Amino acid sequence: NAGVTQTPKFQVLKTGQSMTLQCAQDMNHNSMYWYRQDPGMGLRLIYYSASEGTTDKGEVPNGYNVSRLNKREFSLRLESAAPSQTSVYFCASRRSPHTDTQYFGPGTRLTVL
Amino acid sequence: GQQLNQSPQSMFIQEGEDVSMNCTSSSIFNTWLWYKQEPGEGPVLLIALYKAGELTSNGRLTAQFGITRKDSFLNISASIPSDVGIYFCAGQKETSGSRLTFGEGTQLTVNP
């Protein structure tokens, strides 16, 4: 039982490049989330998926797209990376939207030059 | 934008001291959560609070849900070096569905 896994752990991109951050959970959770963490800003919600087949915008969705590929996997895509997207990205999941515990992955540290 | 104000931003204390941090909001939350994040890791849930006035403990940690529903407090007693990390509060509203709002975090340093 690995919990929430994220790949890659580190990535450096040039402005304008695209990439997809992968997230998977093996806890049979229904809800999954993508956050970004910047110094002094806490965690800000980018997109979330309350259940398989649904996705919704969070607090800072601009410049990102998501895909809930199946119940296990929730990917985050940057179509044209910008330096402002340099951040640490965390994926999280929880059993349902109404349970308390969100389990976080280890994070992906992204640098956009 | 960010709705939770967490303070202090950072704390430098000696091992054995008690620690207090808090979160305040201009709006009401129905659930308050406290997380700890260690370097290179994702946040881990410490305590969850569901009722106004609720006081909940987890070992040396105690958290309270403010009676106005607009604030929450976390206390750590007799701190030890492994308490080092960033502590985040998070709030959830019934109207926000499954979305959490996070505070900016309190960076705790414990000197042996």
Image (cartoon, coloured by chain):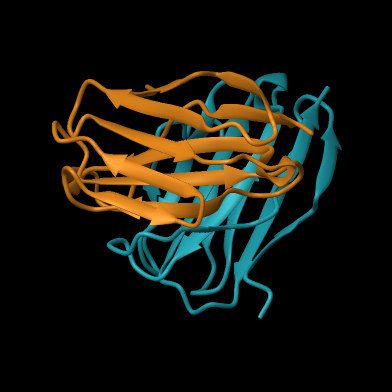
Q: Quick check: A60 above or below A9?
A: above
Point out residue A46 in the picture as x, y percentages from the top left corner: 48, 39
Give the quarter of the figure containing the N terminus of chain A.
bottom right
Q: Residue at x 22, y 38 (%)?
A: B29
Is residue B75 visible in the rendered image? The answer is yes
Q: Quadrant of residue A2?
A: bottom right
Q: Quadrant of residue A79?
A: top right
Q: Quadrant of residue B25?
A: top left
Point out residue B10 in the picture as x, y percentages from the top left corner: 60, 20
* Left or right for A66, reference A83: left
**Front position in the image: B4 or B85:** B85
**Front position in the image: B96 or B42:** B42
Point out residue B42 in the picture as x, y percentages from the top left corner: 64, 49
Q: Quick check: A36 above or below B3?
A: below
Q: Residue at x 64, y 30 (%)?
A: B108
Q: Quick check: A68 above or below A39?
A: below
Give the quarter of the figure containing the C terminus of chain A.
top right
Point out residue A13 in the picture as x, y percentages from the top left corner: 83, 33
The count of marks equals: 0
Q: Quick check: B73 above or below B93?
A: above
Is residue A79 visible in the rendered image? The answer is no
Colour for chain A in the figure: cyan
**Front position in the image: A74 or A14:** A74
* Left or right for B95, reference A91: left
Q: Residue at x 68, y 42 (%)?
A: B80
Q: Residue at x 43, y 51 (%)?
A: A48
**Front position in the image: B27 or A110:** B27
Colour for chain B in the figure: orange
